[in-house]
Image (spheres, rainbow, N blue to C red):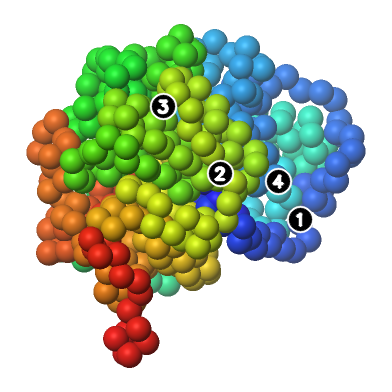
Amino acid sequence: MSGQGDAKRRDDRPNGSQCSSQGRPHGQRGGEARGGRPHAQRGDQPRGPQRTVQPARRVAYDVLRAVSESDAYANLILPPAIAEAHLDPQDAALATELAYGTLRRRGTYDAIIAAAADRPAEEIDPAVLDALRLATHQLLATRVASHAAVNESVNLVASTQGRGAASFANAVLRRISRETPGEWEERIESSARSDDERLALRSAHPVWVIRALRRALAAEGRADELDELLDADNASPEVTLVALPGLAEPGEPRRPYAPTAYGSPGGDPHRVIAATGGTVRVQDEGSQLVALALAAAAPITSGERWLDLCAGPGGKTALLAAIARDHEVTLEANEVIPTRARLVRNALRGVPGEVVVHEEDGRSIGATHPGAFHRILVDAPCTGLGALRRRPEARWRKTPADVAELVPLQVELLSAALDALAPGGIVAYVTCSPHLAETTGVVQEVLRGRTDVTEINARAVLQSVSESSIDLADDGSGRVQLWPHRHGTDAMFLALLQRSATGQGDATSEERD
């Protein structure tokens, strides 16, 4: 794809696919650390004797450190870390729960650690803080024995940060272990300055995210579902596979909506993928549905030309390629970042035939390929608030400033895609975010500036491809918003826009006014 820095993170877009060359400012980590020792520098030697740490905890801790220190993505680094450590299935499951659970509830745990340490979490050395987070998760949210959680976390700190830091960690964890989860929840919530801040501490979501999700639900008349949504964000999602149509058959258990979707039979899904040569892949059911909806938005005519504008790493591209192959359609893809473009090409290896992968800035596609395509998928870079259950660290990285930066990019990409449509062609505008500014706001802004585009009823199209009825809110626009708590999918948004048969361009400035 080609897009904005690391703005988008989803299960089929692990590194934040890009559809333009626009960059993103990275968040600042400020302040001199206290509690342990100063921030570790590369090349520092551990102080104190080497301590034995159970392998699953070591893997989880290493993942936390990579996320904190290098802005790594847990879903990318955890599987190879598990493989390198040769963890058996039981220990692999433990490492996954410890890493993901700790990352999801980081904000809540930081508040508890700060209270127990009597200092702000940001003043604690990051390496020590990650060990404290890991131990706090074990103490308050798992069945791990308290002595094991404390002792092994103290050993982690001792082996990497030295005895002084280990003594500090031991004192903090002993204090945390003396109170129950309910007592800690009551204690930290008593310091909240508002109901939203109280809910943020309880649900481990930043306040601004809670407010954005509430507004999106309220737009559907379902604001009372907020607690269910927050709970779903904190639950471990099941692994869903896609069987590329015409190349593989879905197994069991089948998912309720997408005819291509089914649940992982258990174990390492990558073994299943490798055995099929890429005709089966890991892909959220919501991601499958939006791609299927583009294909079903109108009867397919042999010879059509399709484009996946923001393609990296290629999950939806592969699904569209399989459909295109069955209908004698030419599919092309676009990904501006060379490393991401290689991922797209790799994703397509399981589909016979050639798919050209361009490496252009997606915002220029309308100028370089005017009126060239009959269907275009714009899976735009977004905040990824719809995939927080799969990207546990994402909620703590994003800020409202990211929304303000992304929306203009999303508008440009959608506008460029419409310019690249042939008369009568269809664009599917997709985001893995329910934030109204990134969804309906973008569509409305683009439609306001054009007289050559009409909106197709995406709700009806999605219902037509689904294996069973989907509970979709109807606000009169025909747009689709999926939800983790309601549909068991990521919170994918879909709008279908069709260019008029005459293909006249943008509205004039007088018409816009």
Marks 4, 1: nearer the viewer: 4
Label 1 packing within 10 angstroms: few (<14), some (14-19), many (20+): some
Place of residue 9 in the rendered image (x, y in percent of width and height, measured from the top left): 49, 46
Binning the other alpha carbons within 10 Å of mark 3 as few (below 14), some (14 to 19) or many (20 upward) gives: many
* Amino acid type, callout 2: His
- Give the labeled residue for mark 3: 282
Q: Position of residue 177 (x, y in %)?
A: 53, 39
Measure the alpha-carbon separation of dots 4 and 1. Answer: 17 Å
**Residue 325 sits in quarter:** top left
Q: Name the residue type under label 3.
A: Val
**Cα distance between the residues tagged 2 and 3:** 24 Å
Residue that mark 1 sits on: 34
Residue on which disc 2 sits:
358
Q: Which residue is mark 4?
A: 69
Q: Earlier in the sequence, mark 3 or mark 4?
A: 4
Q: Are marks 3 and 4 in contact (CB under 8 Å)?
A: no
The vertical placement of 381 against 254, above or below, is below
Element carrying mark 3: strand
Q: Where 394 sits versus 211, above or below?
A: above
Q: Identify the secondary structure beneath mark 4.
A: helix
**Residue drawn at point x = 28 percent, y = 58 percent:** 423
Q: Residue 508 at what x, y percent from top left?
A: 35, 83
* For residue 340, side relative to residue 221 (left or right): right
Q: N-terminal of the two: label 4 or label 1?
A: 1
- Residue 484 located left or right of residue 180: left
The one nearer the camera, 335 or 69, is 335
Which of pointers 2 and 1 lies earlier in the amino acid sequence? 1
Secondary element under disc 2, as helix, strand or loop, is strand
Q: Is residue 137 visible?
A: no
